[in-house]
Image (tube, rainbow, N blue to C red):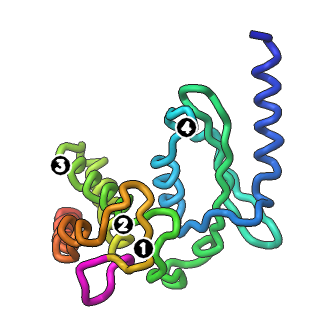
């Protein structure tokens, strides 16, 4: 190994990060938490987990964008993810359109995150329990955006990028009633 190869990689990584925000089609995020949940579901090409190095706010043509630099824990490859944050950046919570469902994460991502947080909160210290329950409620609320107001199945245009489960399976596994019950449970525990 040459001693300067690591420095060259770091220099190239900085150059990529400096111009990453000018991409034409950034990923549209609805919150910073959604960005990190999206990244937690991604793996490197080698199969390794990704670790966040830097998170920066940049502007392109007047639009705010988050640029998150990550590195692979296994092979040390470098990646930049760019998110369009105009949906929520600089807005007060009442001004954010809460009915738009995610284009980054699907029903399976939200359900996995919501139920995981709910189960982890059972054995978490008191300081961590509330945060897990809040994350659980937030994930269930995001999951509900994929469901019609009077049905037990996701919208037909909902995408399923991990398991590609058929709608019949989803209807059985995550009916609206089960989801609503889990959310009520988390909210009740938060109010104690």
Give x and y (percent) for residue 162: 41, 55
Could you tell me how far apart the alpha carbons at marks 1 and 2 are, in whole angstroms? Answer: 8 Å
Quarter of the C terminus within the rendering = bottom left
The answer to which of 167 and 98 lies nearer the viewer is 167
Asked where in the image residue 32 lies, by quadrant, the reply is bottom right
Specify whether residue 13 is in view.
yes
Looking at the rendered structure, the secondary structure element under dot 3 is helix
- Nearest to viewer (mark 4 / mark 2): 2
The answer to which of 14 and 189 lies nearer the viewer is 14
Quarter of the N terminus within the rendering = top right
* Earlier residue among tags 1 and 2: 2
Which residue was labeled with disc 3? 122
Q: Is residue 177 above or below residue 95?
A: above
Residue interval drawn in magenta:
145-153
Kindly identify which numbered label has been placed on residue 119. none
Give x and y (percent) for residue 191: 20, 67
């Amino acid at each position: 190994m040459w001693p300067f190869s690591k420095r060259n990689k770091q220099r190239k990584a900085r150059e990529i990060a400096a111009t990453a925000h000018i991409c034409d089609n950034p990923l549209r995020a609805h919150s910073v938490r959604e960005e990190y949940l999206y990244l937690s579901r991604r793996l490197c090409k080698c199969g390794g987990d990704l670790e966040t190095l830097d998170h920066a706010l940049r502007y392109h043509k007047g639009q705010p964008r988050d640029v998150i630099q990550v590195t692979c824990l296994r092979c040390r490859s470098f990646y930049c993810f760019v998110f369009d944050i105009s949906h929520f950046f600089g807005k007060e919570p009442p001004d954010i359109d809460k009915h738009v469902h995610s284009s980054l994460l699907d029903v399976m991502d939200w359900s996995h995150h919501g139920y995981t947080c709910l189960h982890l909160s059972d054995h978490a210290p008191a300081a961590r329990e509330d945060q897990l329950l809040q994350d659980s409620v937030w994930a269930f609320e995001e999951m509900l955006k994929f469901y019609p107001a009077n049905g037990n199945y996701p919208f037909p245009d909902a995408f399923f990028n991990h398991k590609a489960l058929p709608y019949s399976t989803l209807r059985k596994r995550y009916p609206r009633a089960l989801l609503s019950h889990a959310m009520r449970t988390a909210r009740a525990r938060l109010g104690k």
